[in-house]
Image (cartoon, helix red, strand yellow):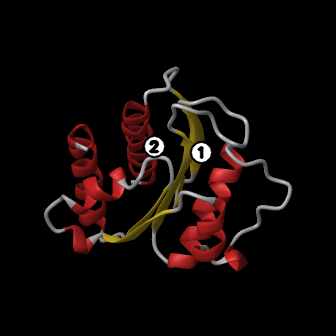
């Protein structure tokens, strides 16, 4: 998590300066982004909460399905991750949300992609989604890389919205 702290500080500074709120959705990253944001002083001023949804069963139980339109979307694609982020934003009624899902390794995803593959998305005044491919099957390295990609995309969107 330590490598994510400088990025999380930048996110915290941007959100606090604008009085905006965020909720974080994670999967293969295991909550590292939420932990890095909560570690920032004054986190309660911008951080609503986060979820780590690791299995489809948990997703069905936790997500408000009425806020999602996943029909005809393939899992582990930018379009799927974007819909998750957009639906989570509607559900949480906040300024920004993120989503992340992937295969940290050492095995690949049951949806097909190889280990080290993830998708990250941001929903807010600026919304974007992208694929992440690390080229490794080392689980903890991929978790950190997925968290870094999620925070970097969030910073990109926050700065573009400024």
Residue 106: percent from left, percent from top: 51, 31
Q: Residue at x 26, y 53 (%)?
A: 36
Residue 155: percent from left, percent from top: 38, 46
The numbered disc on residue 92 is: none
For this orientation, the residue located farthest to the right is 72
Q: Are marks 1 and 2 in contact (CB under 8 Å)?
A: yes
Inspect this view and state whether residue 120 appears.
Answer: no
Q: Nearer the viewer, residue 108 or 51?
A: 108
* Depicted 89 relative to depicted 11: above or below: below
Q: Residue at x 63, y 29 (%)?
A: 114
* Depicted 125 relative to depicted 77: above or below: below
Q: How many marks?
A: 2
Which quarter of the figure has residue 144? Answer: top left
* Depicted 68 relative to depicted 132: above or below: below
- Count neighbours of disc 2 (C-alpha within 10 A) and say few if under 14, some if 14 to 19, many if 20 or more: many
Residue 113: percent from left, percent from top: 68, 33
Inspect this view and state whether residue 48 appears.
Answer: yes
- Count neighbours of disc 1 (C-alpha within 10 A) and say few if under 14, some if 14 to 19, many if 20 or more: many
Residue annotated with mark 1: 129
Label 2: element kind: helix
For this orientation, the residue located farthest to the top is 135
For this orientation, the residue located farthest to the left is 41
Residue annotated with mark 2: 153
Which quarter of the figure has residue 35? Answer: bottom left
């Amino acid at each position: 998590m330590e490598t994510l702290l400088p990025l999380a500080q930048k996110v915290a500074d941007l959100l606090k300066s604008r009085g905006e709120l965020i909720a974080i959705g994670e999967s293969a990253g295991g909550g590292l982004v939420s932990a890095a944001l909560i570690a920032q002083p004054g986190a309660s001023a911008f951080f609503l909460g986060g979820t780590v949804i690791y299995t489809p069963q948990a997703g069905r139980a936790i997500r408000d399905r009425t806020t999602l339109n996943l029909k005809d979307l393939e899992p582990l694609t930018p379009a799927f991750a974007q819909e998750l982020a957009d639906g989570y934003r509607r559900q949480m009624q906040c300024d920004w949300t993120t989503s992340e899902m992937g295969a940290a390794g050492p095995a690949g995803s049951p949806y097909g992609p190889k280990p080290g593959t993830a998708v990250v998305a941001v929903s807010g005044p600026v919304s974007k989604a992208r694929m992440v491919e690390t080229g490794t099957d080392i689980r903890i390295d991929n978790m950190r890389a997925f968290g870094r990609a999620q925070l970097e995309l969030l910073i990109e969107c926050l700065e573009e919205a400024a």
